[in-house]
Amino acid sequence: MEDQNKMEEFQAKIDAGIKIEPKDWMPEKYRQTLVRQMSQHAHSEVIGMQPEGNWLTRAPSLRAKKILMAKIQDEGGHGLYLYCAAETLGVSRDKFIEWLHEGKAKYASVFNYPSPTWADMGAIGWLVDGAAIVNQVSLQRTSYGPYSRAMVKICKEESFHQRQGYEIMANLAKGTKEQKEMAQGALNRWWWPSLMMFGPHDSDSANTKDSMTWGIKLETNDDLRQQFIDKTIPQIELIGLKIPDEKAELQENGSYKTSEIDWDEFWNVIKGNGPCNAQRLKHHIKAHEEGAWVREAALAYGAKNN
Amino acid sequence: MSKDNQGPIWEVFVQSKPGKPFRHVGAVHAYDKEMAMENARDLYTRRSEGTAIWLVKADDIVASQPEDNGAFFDPANDKAYRHPTFYVMPEGAKNI
Ligand SMILES: [Fe+2]
Ligand SMILES: [Fe+2]
């Protein structure tokens, strides 16, 4: 049993908006929730480099290539900010990677979808980064200090990601008939996976209640998803593409009503049966193992020089 | 999997421009000082966020303990005379 007084003091701090710092007392379950969520977030940034890396060598211009390279580098950086923040909870970097490779830690399911055309680079930046931004803006106020600070840094860097993606889509949408179709195809592919990024309905989300009591989460999955839908639908219409949901309609309150998400697909991809789950993890393990000799050599060199 | 090692953690402090204080921005893993400096530059100043970097090995940092905060910071609590608002100025005093 955890000390009742400490628990009350802890909750009072959260309620007063005082951040929790690494050495502060915290309930074990708060720590575990953060370890899970922050490492999952870090892994997502890193695995998320793969679908975009797929197009690096085939970017249509030098400008496009430089932009894509800078974006992918940012995502790697986001992963590192988050691993460092998560390590303050007393779990080592090696451990986080080991848990990822063993399948004990997850990453965002959205990165288990393929990126078959150049337009997918547009759709990913616009929609996947767009959805991540809505979530991350909210997390800037999260109760754990190191996580909150990492989010502030990440949010500053994200808006270029979304804008470069929307620029790609806008250009394709006003191009040839084939280009416009390519843009629409990518929008159709990424629309539903991006909506799924916000997670299950709050009524089906095991973690939402505790996370909100403890200020880890500030807004519910459904609220965040709705914010994203309401921002994005006018952007779809502006560039002349079709909303990939025939039932989507604007309601009187200014908010859009959309069709139900295919939750069977959602759970299926989480369980590992998405189109690229095996490939993504295999690639990460391979890259990590092939770098082992570098880490060993650097460790020996560092031991000699420090 | 064989025992892995990511190297020690270095805390990173960046000065945004001359005259500003160094601010903690995060950490990096690196095996020696030179690599730590290059990693910190690549990770924390990709958008010209700084003109100078300090690195400190995390193990070398001495930190106060939050559970001692009450007693530890107590000596400062009852010394209101350290603040300018403690003093009564004569009516009409200006520029002080
Ligand atoms: Fe990111
Ligand atoms: Fe991003």
Image (cartoon, coloured by chain):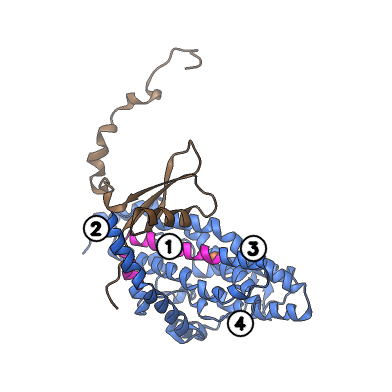
Chain colours: A blue, B brown
Residues behind callouts 2 and 3 on a single chain: yes
Nearer-N-terminus badge (3/4): 4
Inspect the image, locate mark 1, and give the three-letter code of the amino acid beneath it: Leu
Quarter of the picture holding the C terminus of chain A: bottom left
Q: Chain of mark 3?
A: A
Q: Chain of mark 4?
A: A
Q: Which residues are magenta?
A: A71-97
Magenta-drawn stretch contains A88: yes
Q: Chain of mark 2?
A: A
Give neighbour class at mark 1: few <14, some 14-19, many 20+ (Cα, 10 Å).
many
Seen from the viewer's position, the closer of residues B49 and A26 is: B49
C-alpha gap between disc 1 and disc 2: 36 Å
- Measured from the top left, where is residue A267 in percent x and y? 47, 83
* Residue on which the image places disc 2: A4
> Element type at marker 3?
helix
Identify the mark at residue A116; answer none if there is no mark. Answer: 4
* Residue on which the image places disc 1: A80
